[in-house]
Image (cartoon, grey):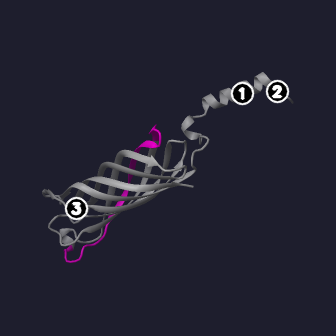
Amino acid sequence: MRLSPVLNLSATAAFALITPSFAQAEEGAAPVAATLEFMIGLSNKFHDGKKERDGRLALGIIPGADKMLARVFGIGGEMAFVWAGDEDDKEARLVVSPHLRARMSFPIVDKITFDGLLGIGPSVWTPVDGVSDAKGGATRFGWSLRFAFGGGYQFNETVAAFANVGYYTSTTYGSDHERNVNSIPLNVGLRAAF
């Protein structure tokens, strides 16, 4: 059975209207974008359940990947490896945070983009040598969250550099009290589309 050209055009237009635009990959959109960022905490606070103190300089490496659902929006995951802790600790503690994330990146002017992301997930605080379990030295589990806003520069269709500032927090429970690290990090990194 053949449909008339007007009916074909009407059906195509109706389909385009009822399909959410964010679920359509636009022409030229990359199906997957991989990122590698480096994090340095500009302001760090550590709370051990009793009082808040200044924290150690937080440093991190965050590899991630996003499935682009549209030209400017993607969802994906990242694995944050953050070294942080109390300023009185002899060494920084590794906090591993696998996050689910949503990321936006849209052009502003020429090759400059606005970037934003939100990630949330569990966290694992690795043990600290020389600190008793009663004082939180053992492996601890909890949750973490980070968000960031900034800009990027698109070198070509596949490679971009970016920098952003945001917020990172990780809370863990156990040993009769919770522990929390808060940081305002500066992140810089590279993004590649595949």
User: Secondary structure under badge 1?
Assistant: helix
Q: Earlier in the sequence, mark 1 or mark 3?
A: 1
- Name above or below for residue 139 compared with residue 63: below
Q: Residue at x 43, y 43 (%)?
A: 112
What residue is pinned by disc 2?
A: 3
What residue is pinned by disc 3?
A: 57
Mark 1, other Cα within 10 Å: few <14 / some 14–19 / many ≥20: few
Q: Earlier in the sequence, mark 2 or mark 3?
A: 2
Q: Is residue 131 magenta?
A: yes
What residue is pinned by disc 1?
A: 11
The reply to whether callout 1 and callout 3 are in contact (CB within 8 Å) is no
Q: Earlier in the sequence, mark 1 or mark 2?
A: 2
Tell me which amino acid carries mark 2. Answer: Leu
Tell me which amino acid carries mark 1. Answer: Ala
Q: Nearer the viewer, mark 1 or mark 3?
A: 3
- Name above or below for residue 84 compared with residue 129: above
Q: CA distance from mark 1 to mark 3?
A: 58 Å
Q: Residue at x 44, y 42 (%)?
A: 113
Q: Quadrant of the N terminus?
A: top right
183 displayed left or right of 70:
left
Q: CA distance from mark 2 to mark 3?
A: 67 Å
Tell me which amino acid carries mark 3. Answer: Leu
Q: Nearer the viewer, residue 180 or 21?
A: 21
Q: Residue at x 57, y 49 (%)?
A: 30
The reply to whether callout 1 and callout 2 are in contact (CB within 8 Å) is yes
